[in-house]
Amino acid sequence: MVVQEQLTKEYAQKLDQQNELKMYRDEFYIQPGVIYFDGNSLGLLSKRAESTLLQLVDSWKKYGIDGWTNGDHPWFYLSEKLGKGNAPLIGAEPEETIVTGSTTINLHQLVATFYKPEGKKTKILADELNFPTDIYALKSQLQLHGYAPEEHLVQVKSRDGNTLQEEDIIEAMTDDIALIVLPSVLYRSGQLLDMKRLTAEAHNRGILIGFDLCHSVGSIPHSLSDWDVDFAFWCTYKHLNGGPGSVGGLYVNKRHFGTCPGLAGWFSSKKDKQFDMEHTLKAAPDAGAYQMGTPHVLSLAPLLGSLDLFNEVGIEKIRKQSLQLTNYLMTLIDAELSEYEFIVANPREDAARGGHIYLEHKEAARICKALKENNVIPDFRTPNGIRLAPVALYNTFEEVWETVQILRKIMKEEQYKKFENKRDVVA
Ligand SMILES: *Cc1c(COP(=O)(O)O)cnc(C)c1O
């Protein structure tokens, strides 16, 4: 039941005053007058991330080649150091995770490492709603093994076009499946899959399972080690605010330590052996083994500051605040936009959704353009989706309130009609 009071700006402001994370907003660069609800696509720059980026530029200036081993953050150990910083966010032991590569590269690496077709077990199980790059990577990995993707990539179907049923996924875990790759949070509908349950079911059938955490890392807590997930991979420029093209991350369950990297390079080496320059790889005994080449130091640098911020706050508190913001957004959408044919297409229950709200509308593309004209930054997803991500560390309840008022005005005045209902090049 919505109480009339909840619909007032004063109520939103009261929620902001009570927010125990409110001091963190000042740590971010927020353009005056702009409501940024796209932190699930590209997170904003924090002052801490800027500062560590500048520190590493400075270490290059000061040390030249010796920056690999000198200064506060020697480059040679940076990926491992960030892996440690990242571990609490995914519920892993520090050696189980490393910051390296990108989502797509890490997926290639992990599939090259863990997809070992044998006997009847030759297929890979995915879903039909995943982000295209994941599917392209899986298909090309199958091709490299000489398997036709049309037959060997099984994609679980969605019943409603937006979400997956865990029962359907489990039913698809047949005895010809060797490996499963699924998203934690679906990039469109924001559905959060039950990773614990799916992992247990996969393992009961002798299947390895890995997750793409792009839309959950930095937004929801994970317990990858406790759930016994085999591997995971993610990007760091969305909720983790690492900056455009920041270096990704991967997780390998310690049960699998010692498994040869499918795609080796000299950074797969044990750190103390790497500069022996031998032609036989002595791989690192931990997740470090799944790195390939020289780390992209300047694209790692902002993560030092950003992860520091996440670990200071703690992911549990971030999740709590994120759920409050998105619940409030849904309440206001239900109350204020009911006459305008919006559909809240993300799951409603807290346990089944991530950090963004997914609104469907047949005029979505041009409504997004009208939002931008009103200084609200949403995210359009073809064909008819509007993603809105009020982010725990820097968005406010008042911004949520304001956005719904603006949406209402756009619909009432039909402001969207002056734009074409077509996406731009990006988004
Ligand atoms: C953002 C995203 C990616 C991006 O992959 P990159 O290699 O960083 O370009 C991949 N998968 C999912 C599910 C994503 O949300």
Image: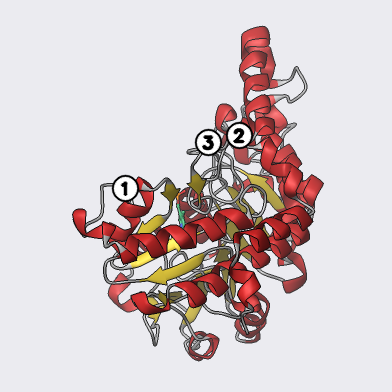
Disc 2 crowd, CA 10 A, few/some/many (<14, 14-19, 20+): many
Inter-mark Cα distance, 2 to 1: 24 Å
Foreground pick, 368 / 49: 368
Inter-mark Cα distance, 3 to 2: 28 Å
Snapshot quadrant of residue 163: bottom left
Q: Which residue is mark 1?
A: 426
Above or below: residue 194 compared with residue 52: below
Q: Which residue is mark 2?
A: 300
Disc 3 crowd, CA 10 A, few/some/many (<14, 14-19, 20+): few
Amino acid under label 3? Pro
Q: Is residue 322 left or right of residue 342?
A: right
Disc 1 crowd, CA 10 A, few/some/many (<14, 14-19, 20+): few
Choose the circle earlier in sequence order: 3 or 1: 3
- Label 1 CB-ligand 1 distance < 8 A: no
Residue at point 50%, 51% (across, down): 103
Q: Do we see residue 283 in this rendering? A: yes
Q: Which residue is mark 3?
A: 32
